[in-house]
Amino acid sequence: MRTGRRLWSNGAVRAGTLVFMLLFALGAAAPWLGTVDPAAMDSSFISVPPGVTGEMTLPDGSLRQHTFWMGSDNVGRDVWSRVLFGTRISLAVGFTTAALALALGALCGLLAGYFRMVDALLMRLMDGLMAIPPVLLAIALVAALGARFGTVVVAIAVPEVPRVTRLVRALVLSLREEPFVEAARALATPPAVILVRHVLPNALAPLIVQGTFVAASAVLTEAILSFLGLGLPADVPTWGNIMAEGRIQFTQHPSNVLFPALFLVPAILAINLLGDGLRDVLDPKFASRTEAQP
């Protein structure tokens, strides 16, 4: 309860949480807030400006009076509906990627930090992965595995695993010398039990903070891949896909790029603010160092 009050009293946590909750609510309510099926096309309304109203032909052949609040794209699809549904997919990619990267990184970090025999092998592998630019590695993995939701998540998560691994390893190297870990070893407690019951709980706070930064990076990387045509298929509404389609007519209709960007930028900013606030609250050493600086 006290930790919750401390978190909410932090301005960065409060601002990031409110913005993220708003975006999450918009994404969750997309089937009701979206004014039309995001895949519905009407050649009569190709690249219309925001605010145009007319009778749109729906996929079942019926006509419906429809207002294009954010205009339409180059094949007559409603940008507002596509941006809302894109919110769901882009955020899902971000947090699924963060969960996968944290799970793999925590496992590798625990093993590398506790077992000296596997430390050298795992960390050299992580150093090799970190030597490759993250976006380039993601592009290579998507090209090899195919552009699907699962493969895109894996491709974005893999470059993040070394950073999580190094964080957890550093924490384990410190924690394994603590008296409570030495006492557990003296009682012949199995290493797996020590790691799960004694070491991992003490590493959760830094992991949660790192997870927010991974999620923000994943949302941005997915948008980059989609913008380059290497992410999810073009018919899947994501912020990156919408901007990639809008850049074709950017000089005539810049709104098709600007509107999804108006969702992408606050999403990344909110998640980063949340991570900064969590770091300030959950890491007293960082907070004291910050206050000590002139």
Image (spheres, rainbow, N blue to C red):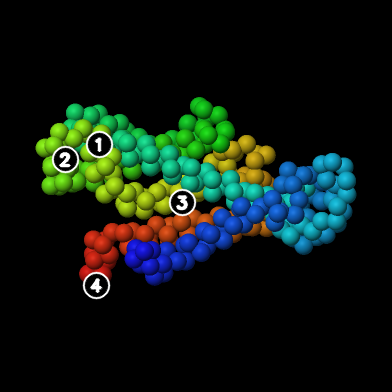
Q: Secondary structure at mark 2?
A: helix
Q: Nearer the viewer, mark 4 or mark 3?
A: 3
Q: Dot 3: few (<14), some (14–19), or many (≥20) neighbours within 10 Å?
A: many
* Furthest residue in direction front, as rendered: 187
* Furthest residue in direction bottom, as rendered: 294
Residue drawn at x 31%, y 51% as measured from the top left: 206
Q: Nearer the viewer, mark 3 or mark 2?
A: 2
Residue drawn at x 40%, y 40% as measured from the top left: 101
Give coordinates of residue 168: x percent, y percent: 28, 43
Mark 3 → mark 1, Cα distance in angstroms: 32 Å
The image quadrant of residue 194 is top left
Dots 4 and 3: beta carbons under 8 Å? no
Q: Which residue is mark 1?
A: 193
Q: Which residue is mark 2?
A: 184
Q: Nearer the viewer, mark 3 or mark 1?
A: 1
Mark 2 → mark 1, Cα distance in angstroms: 9 Å
User: Quick check: 238 left or right of 47?
Assistant: left
Q: Amino acid at mark 2?
A: Ala
Q: Nearer the viewer, mark 1 or mark 4?
A: 1
Q: Secondary structure at mark 3?
A: helix
Mark 4 → mark 2, Cα distance in angstroms: 43 Å
User: Quick check: 75 left or right of 183?
Assistant: right
The vertical placement of 266 against 176, above or below, is below
Give coordinates of residue 175: x percent, y percent: 19, 46
Q: Which residue is mark 4?
A: 294
Q: Nearer the viewer, mark 4 or mark 2?
A: 2
Residue drawn at x 26%, y 62% as measured from the top left: 284
The image quadrant of residue 22 is bottom right
Mark 3 → mark 2, Cα distance in angstroms: 37 Å
